[in-house]
Image (tube, rainbow, N blue to C red):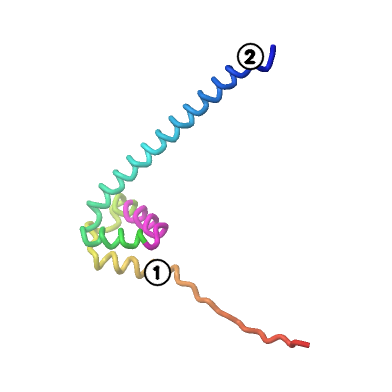
Amino acid sequence: MSEDEYDPELQNLLARRAQEESRRALEERRKREEYEKQKEALLRVILTPEARQRLNNVKLVKPELAESLENQLIALAQAGRIRVPITDDELKEILAQVAEQNKRDYKIQIRERGWK
């Protein structure tokens, strides 16, 4: 068999693989969008409009913090461990507590070296 006989098979295989990857990526994106819609629906119930706006503002500056807080609030609400809806003032308190927990004390030491 010559090299030319393998080319159509190889091209066919590569085309199928590309289609499969495209299909997988599309499915993953669809699942992620569905998850985000469900999360937004839950947050509409858990947070007042003002609190939701504040959380969206936090998301612009610190997306990881906002994502973590959203997941924690949803879990607590589903477990019945928090009173819903959470007001803007209550969310401010929660954010202050989280900021306090994440606050680090930085200690800078300057050592003088003898220059010879």
Dominant SS type (magenta): helix
Q: What element carries label 1?
A: helix
Task: Specify few, some or many for label 1: CA neighbours under 10 Å numbering under 14, 14-19, or 20 or more.
Answer: few
Q: From the viewer's perspective, tell me whether residue 114 is left or right of residue 14.
A: right
The quarter of the picture where the N terminus appears is top right
Q: Nearer the viewer, residue 39 or 26?
A: 26
Label at residue 5: 2
Q: Calculate the distance from the C-alpha at mark 2 to the C-alpha at mark 1.
A: 65 Å
Q: From the viewer's perspective, tell me whether residue 10 is left or right of residue 97.
A: right
Residue 95 location in percent, x, y?
A: 34, 66
Q: Which of 25 and 79 is in front in this view?
A: 25
Amino acid type for the residue under numbered disc 2? Glu
The answer to which of marks 2 and 1 sits earlier in the sequence is 2
Residue at image coords 28%, 58%: 82
Provide the residue span drawn in magenta: 61-74
The quarter of the picture where the C terminus appears is bottom right
Asked if the residues shown at circle 2 and circle 1 are in contact, with their CB atoms under 8 angstroms apart, the answer is no
- Position of 94 relative to 114 (above/below): above
Determine if the magenta segment contains residue 66.
Answer: yes
Label at residue 99: 1
Residue at image coords 45%, 31%: 22
